[in-house]
Structure formats: C-alpha cells, structure tokens
Amino acid sequence: MSRYGYRQRPSLFVRLFRFVLALLVVYAAVLGISAHRIGTWVDHTIDAYETFESTFDSGDYEQARAAVDDVAQTVSQISTEAHAWYWHLAQNVPYFGEDVTCAQQLSRIASNLGNNALVPVLDSTEAALSDLSRVGEVVRALTNARNVVSTCRQDFEALPASHFDSLNELATKLQKAVIDTDDVFDKLSVVLDIANAFV
C-alpha cells in the first residue's frame, strides 16, 4: 500500500445528489424571493384599493381613477409573477401545488375585479361628469360590473382554503374588497337613479 493517502473520488450518485440538492436550494431561494415580491405588491394593492374606495365615496374621481390604475398595474405584476415558470414547476408538487393554484386564482379574481369592473365604471363616470347625457353609459358599465362582482363572489366560494396563513389572509382581504366594491356600486346606483331624473 502506498505511503501517500489516497482520497477516493465521490461516486457518481453522491455527485448527482449534491448537484440536485444545490439546484433545489437555488430553486427554493427563487421561490422565496418571488413570494416576497408578491407579498409586497399585495400590500400595495390593498392600500391602493382603500384609497380608491375613500376617494370614490368622496367624489374625487380623479384620485379614484389614479388609485384604480395603480391597483390594475400592481395586480398585473402579481399575475405575471404568479404564472412564471418557476411557479408552474411548483404547481406539480403534491400539497404545495394546491397553494400555487390558489395564488394564481386569487390574482385572476383581482385582475377581473380591477380591469372588468372598477376601470369601466370609473371611465364611464368620468365621461358622464362632463356630459350628463352619457349617464346611460354609466348604467351599462355598472350593470356589467355588478355581474363581474357576482362572478368574483362565486369564484371565492369555489376557492379552497390554502395551507398557508398568508394566502388565506390575502383571500380574506380580497374578498372584503369584492364585498366593499359591491357596496360602492350600490351607492352609485342610488346616485344614478337621481341623475336619470334630471337627464
């Protein structure tokens, strides 16, 4: 036997295991960074929505529109992030995959609410402020928007509970936003009934 120590090279299996483990660590870090980004955007979205609600109630439609544009832009970022390739991979993982699907569905509900309910109603409301003869456009937009809100409520009923408290908290906040939007539209309906009497 040689006097010099001989260090045996790790087997192919060990090297492969280390490589896969390193990939998993990197992948977990990517998901963690992405989840942090989504969480930051969610907080911003909730704040922007609350701004919309308060300014719309006070009749400051310019600020309300800016807030809704902010909501729509941030929700778009969330949706893009939640549908990135690394989340699609995670979607196939048992147990955790259900939560990825839940997050994607939440982003879809938020996008539907912002783009297909809030934005059209605000657009038509702004138009009617400068031309009362266009009140009918608000009525039509509001009717369509209420159908969207109804769909969002149905989507929430079909949404399973997540395994993560953060996702459940997000679902609760978003569901409250949907309900609050319905209340805002109720108030707008009353205003429209009055406006129609003078058109």
Image (tube, rainbow, N blue to C red):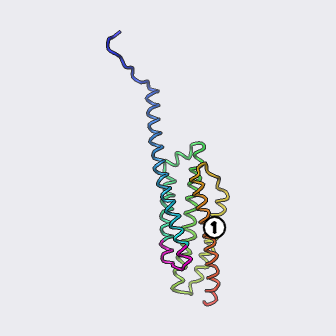
- In magenta stretch: residue 69: no
Q: Which image quarter is the C terminus in?
A: bottom right
Percent of width and height locating residue 63:
48, 75
Q: Which image quarter is the N terminus in?
A: top left
Looking at the image, residue 62 sits to the left or right of residue 171; the answer is: left
Residue plotted at (59% across, 42% down)? 94
Residue plotted at (60% across, 58% down)? 171
Looking at the image, residue 115 sits to the left or right of residue 2; the answer is: right
Which residue is tagged 1? 179
Residue plotted at (46% across, 55% down)? 37
Percent of width and height locating residue 130:
51, 85
Indicate the secondary structure of the residue bearing disc 1.
Answer: helix
Residue plotted at (64% across, 64% down)? 151
Question: In the rendered image, which quarter is residue 175 located in?
Answer: bottom right
Q: Which residues are magenta?
A: 54-66
Looking at the image, residue 9 sits to the left or right of residue 38; the answer is: left
Question: In the rendered image, which quarter is residue 177 located in?
Answer: bottom right
Question: Against 188, is 78 above or below?
Answer: above
Question: Against 81, is 90 above or below?
Answer: above
Disc 1 residue type (three-letter): Ile
Q: How many marks?
A: 1
Single out the residue that lies furthest toward the top: 1
Percent of width and height locating residue 89:
52, 45
Percent of width and height locating residue 194:
63, 86
Crowd around label 1: few <14 · some 14–19 · many ≥20 (10 Å):
some
